[in-house]
Structure formats: structure tokens, C-alpha cells
Amino acid sequence: MRRSLVVVLDFGSQYTQLIARRIREQHVYCEVHPCTTPPDRIAAMAPRAIVLSGGPASVYAPGAPALDPRLLDLDVPILGICYGMQALCHVLGGRVVPADRREYGPATITVRHAVGLFAAFGEGEPVDVWASHGDRVEALPPGWRLLADSPAAPFAAACDARGRIHGVQFHPEVVHTPRGADMIAAFLFEIAGCRPDFTPGSFVDEAVERVRHQVGDGRVVCGLSGGVDSAVAAVLVHRAVGDRLTCIFVDNGLLRRDEAVEVVRTFRDQLRLPLVHVDASRRFLDALRGVTDPETKRKTIGRLFIEVFEEAASGVGGADFLVQGTLYPDVIESTTFHGGPSAVIKSHHNVGGLPERMRLRLVEPLRELFKDEVRRVGDALGIPHHVLWRHPFPGPGLAIRCVGEVTEERLRILRDADAVLDAEIRAAGLYERLWQAFCVLLPVRSVGVMGDDRTYEHVVAIRAVDSVDGMTADWARLPYEVLGRVASRIVSEVRGCNRVVYDVSPKPPSTIEWE
Ligand code: XMP
């Protein structure tokens, strides 16, 4: 049976991705498309339901994204959220007026009819919601009925006569609407008849089929970094095409302590992936000699990576495809209504240039998934927990954490300090609660005292951050005892370091990495 699909039309809300996340959390597959997608294209996707996102515009603003009325002819259940509801009312003959002031923040609505979205609620029940809208629905379209109201929004929720089209003037998708998940579930299952058939297992089966179909009897190469995305993508593709996949692991000499050994052990020995391990440490360190400018470092490493990868891939002979671990947020950011500039921020993370140069076609088996879904799929594929929950690690590796010149001696100090931090963070049970925790070696020396002697040695900064996506972050409030233990172990155990500082800068204005 065909998998249930929900189409989320993006009218520019900052919460659009969140709507998609909430639907996926109910195990229903959904895709985000721009609000300008022609209705016949949407019809061809045969969705079970359509959700219209919120958006910053007023339906009266010149150039406001319009709702194509032909969408309503598809006879698919629709949920309009904030702007989505206003656009529905506008098209269907209701009245939308600009409010004197924007209603923003917590609000309490009262359920007037416990049906549809509110089937699991009681009549007269007050419900906490998060409101954020400028315009206000002043009169419902003919035949519609009120489901809930609030002092500021007389039509906080309503539906059409058949109960197929619903609109809400608040955001069920944000955490500040505590029972938003119940409303979304009611829409998906009771109103639209979706099935919760999007599970890691079903995804794996379909993805394997798709990869087989795309690759035919071609040969595939995959750059393995040890990170979550490339690991899951590689294992999935291996399941699809077996040993026609070759994984290439380029050891650039800029990895954390023992990491190269660990990658080989996990992927070649444990997961049995065909793996070519290229130790190119010397070449990278030679190329980085004397380089201190962060951008030059990144470019040097990126260029050399392509060179080394290309050589290794040509050794494989006749590769036609390259696996890439692109995820859904990257896809959404580059295609939707407000996408564009935000997509550029991360472009340096990808292996740019390779596919064109090598004339390879891309295999992107994770294009539809969010990060947490990738982890669940990885789990279903039997990938070890420590690989799936590893902190992100930048492609240019320790080079961009060695502020100043990258030398073997400086890398040694950084690695040793980093290993102490990593061990202590894990021992304190904090590893999986943090987005990242790492050390940075600063290009300064400081005076210290050891016994009766004066020392003049390196300074290490600890960087630990909380974040949901790496786009913004805050410094982690690590317990003082943990910080104290890490600092004293580093200065006593790491030769050449006599001072440790803690970085308390949020992103923005700082970035997570120092370079
Ligand atoms: P910044 O430093 O930009 O980092 O705040 C945001 C997140 O991205 C990671 N990062 C990279 N990842 N290649 C990568 O694969 C890179 O060149 C790169 N630069 C930064 C960083 O570790 C953080 O998680």
C-alpha cells in the first residue's frame, strides 16, 4: 500500500520545518514545498492532507503569497495555520482584518465544539496555545463553524461544514502549545485518515529499493568521515548494492586521538564495509606548513581532500556514483519560500566540486530525513550507538581548532587536552546532552609556575555548547566541578600546557568553531 503523504506548503513561516517535524513525529511522511507549487503538481503527489504554514505577510500586503483556489478543488483535507487560515478565509469568502496590534505570545483559547481537531478535548476546556499573527479572522467563510475562541481571536479555530478544512490562529507545532501534538494527530488520523507508516524500517526498505533502481549495475564511492550522516548513508547504500560500493576514508592527520583506528575498526571490521583507508597525514601537514589564515587553511584542506579522494577513487576503477549524506533541512533551505541565503552558511561543510570534476552522479539516500530520523534509521541498520551519537566534527578537523600554525607538536597538545575533556564529559554523563565539547589551542603562551620553576607555555580553551542545529548556540553551563577537574587534569597531564580558559560566547555573534 502507498505510504501516506502530507504536503506542507510553506508561506514563509519560521516554523515551517517544525510543522514537518511534528508530522514526522507521528510517523507520517511529509514534504515541504513552496506555496507557489502549482495545484496540479500537488495533485500528482496524491497527498492525504495539506498543511498551509503560517507566514509573516498580511493577506492584504502587495505581493503577499496567495493561496491558489484550485487547491481546494483537490478535495484533500487542509489545515491552515495562522497565515494559512487567513489565506483560506480570504479565498473562501470570510473576512480578515488587520489587527491593531500583533498578537504574539502565550494565549488561552476556549474549546466551543469538541470535534475535529479538538475531538480529544472537553467542551468549554481552556487550552494554552502560542499565538503569533498580525491579521485576524473577523468573519468565517459561509458554512464554517467555530471550534475555539479567545478574547483576542474570536475565531481561534474553525472548520468547514464537512469538517475537511480546518484553520487555527495559533501555532500547534511549537512546544509552547503543550497539546499541539494532540491536535496534529487528530488532523492526521481522524480527519485525513493518514496511517502512521513512516518508520525507520519502512524507510530502509524503500531507500534500499530506490538506491538499487538509481544505481543499476553501476559502481559507487562514498567518502567516510566517521560522522553520523556519511556512516548511515554508506551502510544503507551497502545494503542496496553490496560490494559495488567502496568507502574511502581519508585520514588527513587532523583527527582526534585514536579516531582513525576507531573508524577502520567500526566500519571495516564491525560493519564489514569495503573500506579503503588512505593515510594522507603527511601531505596535509606539509600543505599546511606556515598557514595561519583560517580561510586559507580551509581551502588548502578542501582542495587536497578532493585531490586525495580522486586518486583513491580512480584506484577503485570506473565509479559512476558518489554517495552524499545530504539531509532534509538542507533540501528545504535551498528550495522553499524563504530559502536562499541561509543555505549558504553551511556550504563549506560539503565536499564541493567533487561530483562535477569526477563526473559522478550523486546518490543522496538521506535527502528526506531530519537528523534524529537519521539516527533512528542508523539504529535500525545496526550501526553502533557511539557512532550515531558522536558530536559533529568539522571537515577541516583539528586544523581549525589549532589557532595559528598547524604543527605536529601543536596537534599533539590539542589532542591530549581534547582526550581529557572528552573523557571527563563522558564520565560526568554530559556527552549526549551537549551539542559539542572540544578544546582549542590558542596562539599565545602564558606564564605559570610549576614547583619552584617559572613556566611559559600554551593555553587551551574549552568550548562546550548547547544547540539544536548548530545554526545558533549558547555556551553550556558546565558544572564548575567538571570544569575544574578538566582544567587541573589538562595542566598536569598535557605536556606544554599551563593554562585553561572557558569560552562563554554564544553564537551569534561568535561561531562555534574558532576559525
Ligand atoms: P560554526 O563554527 O560555523 O559551526 O558555528 C557550526 C557547526 O558546523 C560545524 N562546522 C563544520 N562542519 N565542515 C563540517 O563538516 C566544516 O568546514 C565545518 N565548519 C564548522 C561546527 O563544528 C559546528 O557544529
Image: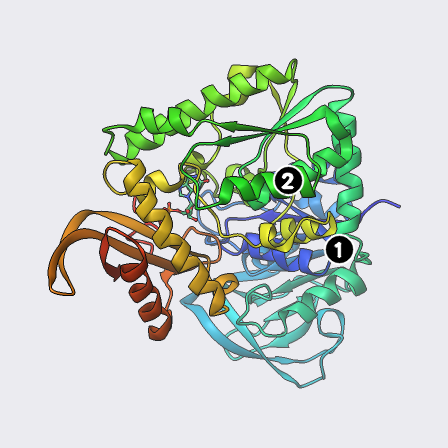
Quadrant assignment, res 244 = top right
Colouring chosen for the image of the structure: rainbow
Pointer 2: residues within 10 angstroms few (<14), some, or many (20+)? many
**Element at badge 2?**
helix
Name the side, left or right, on which 275 lies relative to 63.
Answer: right
Pointer 1: residues within 10 angstroms few (<14), some, or many (20+)? many
The residue that label 1 is drawn on is 77
Residue found farthest to the right: 1
Which residue is more in the foreground, 261 or 243?
Answer: 261
Residue beneath the point at 41% across and 30% down: 281
The answer to whether residue 336 is visible is no
Q: Position of residue 66 (x, y in %)?
A: 56, 45
Ligand 1 image position (quadrant)? top left
Label annotation for residue 432: none
Q: Position of residue 415 (x, y in %)?
A: 37, 48
Quadrant assignment, res 472 = bottom left
Name the side, left or right, on which 190 lies relative to 179.
Answer: right
Label annotation for residue 267: 2
**Element at badge 1?**
loop
Is label 1 or label 2 in front? 2
Residue type, numbered disc 1: Pro
- Give above or below for 232 relative to 428: above
